[in-house]
């Protein structure tokens, strides 16, 4: 008489279509048990799957993936896990992408039923669709009849390649955490290729334009800031978060330790973008003199303001660059100031971040090596420096080739004739 199988040990049965299937009780992620089926063409194939499933159960590992909607899990991940791991600005952009685009498209999918094809299809549709139509699209509206609420017609405003990459990063990060919590067994977003980004060509100011801009900025109360941005390549938020304790005018150095960013309606001080961004920068003597004059002017402003000189909540003491009332400067306001300066200087309009590119380009033109530029700008890798400024390195590479001729002292064909 055949030995009866124990309860929960699993059974293997041949189906009418010739295939085999097995069933066994396994753990769900919430600790409860459920019956799970596996299928195969041969008995040995199914037996192997059954053994693997039973081994996971013996170790207390959930073998049944979660059936919760992906939208619910995304909400949980953004509320409890992501804030501990992401910078505030990154978290804010992830929340926006999830609310406006990812959850409407994939939110109803079961977590354990989300497939690489679903992710690939979403990224393709996201890349090809108008952002405004995606935000307010009516599912019953026929294709080709979509309109943007603001203009009454489709504005054809497509997401940038970088935005598509961010959407893919949200999916990848959320699903990776689901694996850690043993809710699913694979990250389908990692299987899908990351959308490629064609980098935009950097168009920094040339030396003539930079001189015109700084000459016009001499009359500005924040002249030292504009000179610092062009001369050291600080990020906008890094410069506006500097305190006088970070600046050593005698040694001619400053330390980058924090930044400030606008997150929704608040100005938030935090740590710099990467560990490489925490750095000490050497100051040109022109910057030292400008900062010395700026400090004296700030003291005069403080006396004139009197009781009105008051720091904003959460603002570090003794900021280098403030409003005339002693409050932190809104990074967005700096863009408006630069637009006016460009107009008055009669140079093409650039962003504040383009002054950082200008600094790197001027350093390259002076023959400064890429490693030094990487350290000055606070790039995380030298690859980022080389990729970003490859198109402006032609002069430097030509000079390097000429110096090699000088070093080797080789005679030219004309000299040997």
Image (cartoon, rainbow, N blue to C red):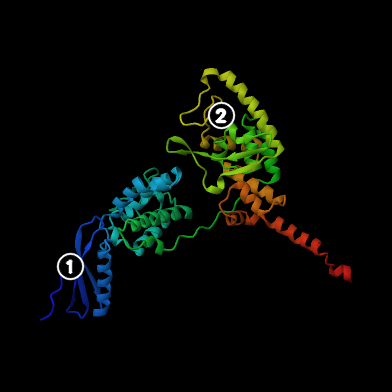
Q: Residue 150 appears at what percent x and percent y?
A: 39, 42
Q: Residue 300 appears at what percent x and percent y?
A: 62, 21
Front residue of 198/260: it is 260
Kindly identify which residue carries mark 2.
Answer: 318
Q: Residue 124 appears at what percent x and percent y?
A: 40, 60
At x 36%, y 49%, the residue is: 98
Q: Quadrant of the C terminus?
A: bottom right
Question: Relative to 217, does residue 44 appear above or below in the rendering?
Answer: below
Q: Quadrant of the N terminus?
A: bottom left
In the image, which disc is placed on residue 343?
A: none
Q: In the drawing, does residue 2 fall left or right of residue 59? A: left
Considering the numbered disc 1 on the image, is that residue within a helix, a strand or a loop? loop
Instruction: State how far apart marks 1 and 2 are (Cα).
Output: 69 Å
Kindly identify which residue carries mark 1.
Answer: 8
Considering the numbered disc 2 on the image, is that residue within a helix, a strand or a loop? loop
Q: In the drawing, does residue 92 fall left or right of residue 140? A: right
């Amino acid at each position: 008489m055949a030995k009866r199988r124990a309860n929960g040990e699993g059974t293997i049965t041949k189906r009418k279509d010739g295939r085999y299937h097995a069933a066994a009780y396994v753990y769900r992620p919430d600790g409860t048990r459920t019956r799970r089926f596996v299928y195969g063409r041969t008995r040995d194939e199914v037996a192997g799957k059954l053994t693997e499933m039973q081994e996971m159960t013996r170790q207390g590992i959930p073998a049944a993936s979660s059936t919760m909607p992906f939208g619910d899990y995304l909400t949980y991940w953004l509320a409890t896990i992501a804030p501990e791991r992401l910078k505030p600005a990154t978290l804010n952009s992830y929340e926006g992408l999830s609310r406006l685009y990812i959850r409407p498209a994939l939110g109803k999918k079961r977590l354990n039923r989300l497939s690489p094809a679903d992710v690939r299809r979403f990224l393709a549709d996201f890349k090809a669709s108008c952002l405004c139509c995606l935000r307010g699209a009516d599912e019953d509206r026929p294709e080709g009849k979509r309109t943007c609420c603001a203009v009454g017609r489709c504005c054809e405003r497509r997401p940038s390649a970088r935005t598509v990459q961010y959407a893919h990063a949200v999916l990848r990060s959320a699903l990776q955490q689901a694996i850690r919590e043993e809710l699913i067994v694979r990250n389908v977003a990692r299987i899908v290729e990351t959308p490629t980004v064609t980098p935009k060509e950097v168009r920094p100011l040339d030396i003539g334009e930079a001189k015109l801009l700084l000459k016009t900025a001499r009359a500005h109360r924040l002249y030292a800031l504009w000179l610092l941005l062009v001369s050291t390549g600080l990020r906008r938020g890094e410069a506006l978060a500097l305190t006088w304790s970070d600046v050593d005018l005698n040694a001619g150095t400053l330390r980058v330790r924090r930044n400030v960013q606008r997150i929704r309606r608040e100005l938030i001080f935090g740590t710099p973008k990467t560990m490489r961004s925490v750095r000490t920068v050497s100051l040109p003597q022109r910057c030292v003199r400008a900062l010395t004059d700026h400090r004296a002017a700030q003291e005069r402003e403080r006396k004139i303001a009197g009781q009105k000189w008051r720091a904003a909540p959460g603002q570090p003491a003794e900021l280098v660059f403030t409003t005339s009332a002693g409050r932190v400067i809104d990074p967005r306001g700096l863009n408006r100031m630069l637009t006016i300066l460009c107009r008055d200087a009669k140079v093409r309009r650039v962003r504040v971040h383009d002054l950082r590119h200008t600094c790197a380009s001027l350093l390259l033109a002076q023959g400064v090596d890429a490693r030094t530029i990487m350290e000055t700008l606070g790039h995380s890798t030298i690859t980022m420096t080389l990729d970003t400024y490859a198109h402006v390195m032609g002069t430097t590479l030509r000079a390097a080739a000429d110096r090699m001729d000088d070093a080797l002292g080789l005679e030219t064909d004309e000299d040997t004739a």
